[in-house]
Image (spheres, rainbow, N blue to C red):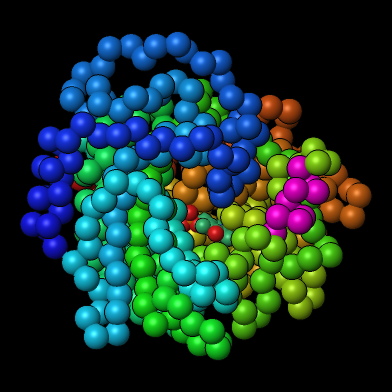
Amino acid sequence: MRRGILLWNSLLSTMSRPLLHSRAQSLSLGCPSSVSRKRLHTVAAAAPVAGERRAKANVDWDSLGFGLKDVAETMYVSEWTPDKGWDQGKLVPYGPITIMPSAQVLNYGQGIFEGMKAQESAKGRVVVFRPDQNAARFKAGAARMSMPAVPEEQFVEAVKSTVAANLDYVPPIGKGSLYLRPLLLGTGPILGLGPAPSYTFTIFAAAVGAYFKGGQLTPIDLIVEERFHRAAPGGMGGTKAAGNYSPVLVTQLEAKKNGFSDVVYLDAKTDTYLEEVSSCNIFVVKGRTIKTPPLQGTILPGVTRRSIVELARSRGYDVREEPVTVHEAMEADEVFTTGTAVVVSSVGSMVYRGQRRQYTEPGQAGKVALEMYSNLTDIQTERADDNFGWVVPIN
Ligand SMILES: *Cc1c(COP(=O)(O)O)cnc(C)c1O
């Protein structure tokens, strides 16, 4: 597999690459952020930068948003067939994948995704964060959706080669990251309900901005949702399945119209316990105790969630994965959410049944959120020692 990729790489670097940047799309999936929607003032020309990789991409590092404006030129594609299993995978120019209208994923939704980031680190190299965790989640998701799992080793290698092929799209440290979007799709045609006869594993990438440019987390305002649920016991809420994400739009869009960043979902059985936000996990803080809802199948097992649990424990917090009632959350000192894109988002306020709980001073992030954000981002960008072994270098 490696030789094939290397061959393609050298081929690519000798070709003059066509510009395949697509138009800016609406905000991609990611935790809510008040900053991301307010584009900062565009700086006309990028300052001269060191290193070959930055000179290549025609990207204005200072005006990166969270979208597809600066989609990377090279993507990874691997195909699965029943007789051959997964092929070696190859790197190809970013572009359409051709599938039939009868593709399983278009009819019955056999599709899962991942979200990861590659960043330039303080050591001057490009690193990814805990790719083994995404590989394991991708495998578990494939099982839940009756798809052939991508071997974890192939997943990690595919991530690494996608980043390596797009190094010139990795923003300078502090300016953002190369967001990676692995997909596993039932692309083969089928009419009756059943699993697809063939599958595609692909990874595309895009340069995206830092959510919090000044390093200051702008708090978000949330509302507790009581009419709709994100997931039900025994369902697929714990899977990053494509089908989980369009149903949250109806509540998310309404919340946004009313000035909120997103909604908090409650458990489908009792409407009592916090679950999570549309695409991030949630934590509540009281004194030195940090609680986050346990993983019981309805909550997405976030890599950031796991990392914050481990990090906070190592910093002496009493961290509990326990059910959290909405009343407890309303009385907490602090609430924050976690996800790959934002890392940590401080919750400024939460509204439940018309009652508003203000956690922080306007515009000010919560103390614990700030501590977790800086500690985790310091590890992710190698500003601090990585005692956990989470960071994986690409180059
Ligand atoms: C992706 C996702 C998260 C966050 O997971 P990370 O691995 O931390 O990015 C949380 N909740 C939902 C519903 C998600 O899809």
Q: Which quarter of the picture shows residue 174?
A: top left
- Relative to residue 315, is residue 140 depicted above or below? below
x 15%, y 49%: residue: 8
**Residue 371 visible in the current orientation:** no
Q: Tell me residue 21's x, y (percent).
A: 41, 35
Q: Which quarter of the picture shows residue 367?
A: top right
Q: Which residues are magenta?
A: 248-256
Horizontal side of residue 127 vs 191, given as left or right: left
Q: Tell me residue 386's x, y (percent).
A: 28, 45
Pick the residue in front: 37 or 133.
Answer: 37
Horizontal side of residue 158 vs 194, given as left or right: left
Q: Quadrant of the N terminus?
A: bottom left
**Residue 280 visible in the current orientation:** yes
Pick the residue in front: 383 or 195.
Answer: 195
Q: Tell me residue 119's x, y (percent).
A: 33, 38
Label count reads 0
Pick the residue in front: 36 or 275.
Answer: 36
x 17%, y 35%: residue: 15
- Relative to residue 58, is residue 79 depicted above or below? below
